[in-house]
Image (spheres, rainbow, N blue to C red):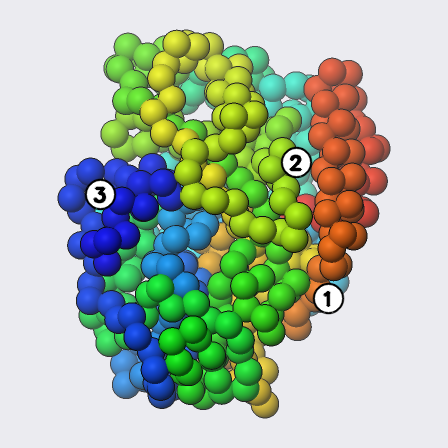
């Protein structure tokens, strides 16, 4: 794996940081597959694949588990994300309720809250040095319209059983006591949320599953998945169960095309900031921070930097849903996020952006994740988190573990367990539709910021896209 270290620096700051600290000693991994037999073959060594292997081998150590990845563990969104472990999942409460009713939706939300703690528990148990810090999440409101939406969301939270000990509103002054961001008039605080160094979690999970007996094959692209068979560029893997956990890179598997499409995203990270700067900003508890118009996620890293990123598909969509190349964010994306960072924190106007990177996360056609197992074919599916995968992937993997082991549990009764939605439209329809919808959303949000009133255009664009929102 040593030969990949130089290219890892282009993947994300998170990998670059580990390399600079000489802290990326991978466990032994294999390359040639030829002809392999296993009980379970997991395609994809991101969070979904690694968590599934971890849970399977924790429950049944005798299992023969093989993990195959076209690159190396964490190459995709798992090594590039914002590091927010939050009890949130794509798909609105109405969407999940249409599958299992309000009770099922409430059970899903409870399971997501517990997943945040389960991630922390495994990190502590396996002694993974990824800076897990559980100090909550702040969703900032900078306009009366945004504040109104947060209040309405809180009222809905109450109807779904979330009390003040879990989620509550903060006044302008209460928010300022935690973080000083320009124009903020209030915030919604979710207590049960954490932040991490994403690539360090990947590395720790890779070591843990290797120690439990999983065989990991890197630089081994899978070309097709059939009943009890995964065909790779180096041979075949025969297994009772084949788990497709390739997420945004599912398009490269002929038999899986158009089940998940990649959505582009980018991130920036500042240089290390001085205590004087943080004296102005605050943010001493390192809460996860979200903001809107456009959607932004931010983290204060454990070594005193600030990361910022979001969904930039409007600026970078590529025909055929081709994943972006490794390397820095495109100039127009870089400029957008730099501008948003300074808009939030004017004190950072002259701060250097030390690193930027881009990547993709996976979205299913109904913009919601799915977990399932076809017992006749032995093919299992997991993923489609639409950028909300850190806690959700842990929950999904434990759910899939129960399905594979034939255990009927509270997790297997969650609405997350469902059939795959219909596939994405073929090109050029996908590109034409995506560009039109994203432009409508962008224009609608721009008008909302300008007028302070809700834009029906955003609702119309969401309806056309099939996007219902999120839960949590």
Are discs 3 and 1 less than 8 Å apart at CB?
no
Which residue is identified by label 2?
Answer: 314
Per the image, label 2 sits on a secondary structure element best described as: helix
Q: Is residue 304 left or right of residue 387?
A: left
Which numbered marker is on residue 19? Answer: 3
In the foreground, 298 or 79: 79
Earlier-in-chain disc, 3 versus 1: 3
Residue 296 image-quadrant placement: top right
Q: Is residue 417 left or right of residue 22?
A: right
Which residue is identified by label 1?
Answer: 422
Measured as percent of width and height from the top left, residue 342 is found at 48, 15
Q: Residue furthest front?
A: 233
- Label 2 and label 1: CA atoms lie apart by 23 Å
Measured as percent of width and height from the top left, residue 375 is found at 56, 87
- Label 3 and label 1: CA atoms lie apart by 41 Å
In the foreground, 174 or 202: 202
Per the image, label 1 sits on a secondary structure element best described as: loop
């Amino acid at each position: 794996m040593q030969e990949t270290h130089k290219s890892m620096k282009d993947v994300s700051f998170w990998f670059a940081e580990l390399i600079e600290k000489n802290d990326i000693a991978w466990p032994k991994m294999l390359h040639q597959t030829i002809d392999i037999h296993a009980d379970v073959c997991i395609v994809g060594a991101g969070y979904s694949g690694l968590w599934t292997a971890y849970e399977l081998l924790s429950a049944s150590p005798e299992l023969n588990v093989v993990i195959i990845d076209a690159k190396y563990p964490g190459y995709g969104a798992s090594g590039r994300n914002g590091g927010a472990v939050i009890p949130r999942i794509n798909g609105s409460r109405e969407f999940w309720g249409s599958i299992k009713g309000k009770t099922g939706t409430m059970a899903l939300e409870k399971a997501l809250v517990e997943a945040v703690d389960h991630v922390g528990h495994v990190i502590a148990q396996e002694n993974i040095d990824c800076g897990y810090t559980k100090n909550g999440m702040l969703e900032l409101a900078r306009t009366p319209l945004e504040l109104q939406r947060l209040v309405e969301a809180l009222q809905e939270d109450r109807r779904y059983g979330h009390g003040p000990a879990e989620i509550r509103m903060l006044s302008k002054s209460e928010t300022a006591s935690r973080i000083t961001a320009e124009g903020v008039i209030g915030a919604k605080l979710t207590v049960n949320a954490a932040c991490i160094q994403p690539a360090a979690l990947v590395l720790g999970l890779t070591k843990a599953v290797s120690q439990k007996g999983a065989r990991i094959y890197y630089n081994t692209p899978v070309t097709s998945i059939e009943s009890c068979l995964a065909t790779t560029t180096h041979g075949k893997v025969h297994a009772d169960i084949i788990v497709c956990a390739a997420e945004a890179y599912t398009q490269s598997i002929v038999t899986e095309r158009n089940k998940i499409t990649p959505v582009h995203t980018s991130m920036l990270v500042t240089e290390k900031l001085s205590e004087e700067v943080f004296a102005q900003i605050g943010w001493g508890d390192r809460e996860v921070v979200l903001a809107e118009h456009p959607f932004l996620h931010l983290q204060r890293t454990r070594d005193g930097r600030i990361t910022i990123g979001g969904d930039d598909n409007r600026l970078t969509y590529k025909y055929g849903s081709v994943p972006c190349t490794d390397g820095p964010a495109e100039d127009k994306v870089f400029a957008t996020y730099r501008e948003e960072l300074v808009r939030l924190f004017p004190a950072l106007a002259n701060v250097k952006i030390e690193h930027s990177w881009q990547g993709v996360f996976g979205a299913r056609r109904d913009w919601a994740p799915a977990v399932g197992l076809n017992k006749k074919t032995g093919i299992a599916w997991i993923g489609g988190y639409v950028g909300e995968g850190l806690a959700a992937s842990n929950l999904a993997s434990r759910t899939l573990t129960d399905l594979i082991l034939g255990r009927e549990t509270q997790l297997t009764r969650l609405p997350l367990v469902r059939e795959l939605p219909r596939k994405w439209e073929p090109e050029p329809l996908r590109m034409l539709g995506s560009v039109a919808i994203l432009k409508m959303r962008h224009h609608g949000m721009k008008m909302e910021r300008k007028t302070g009133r809700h834009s029906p255009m955003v609702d119309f664009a969401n309806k056309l896209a099939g996007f219902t929102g999120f839960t949590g």
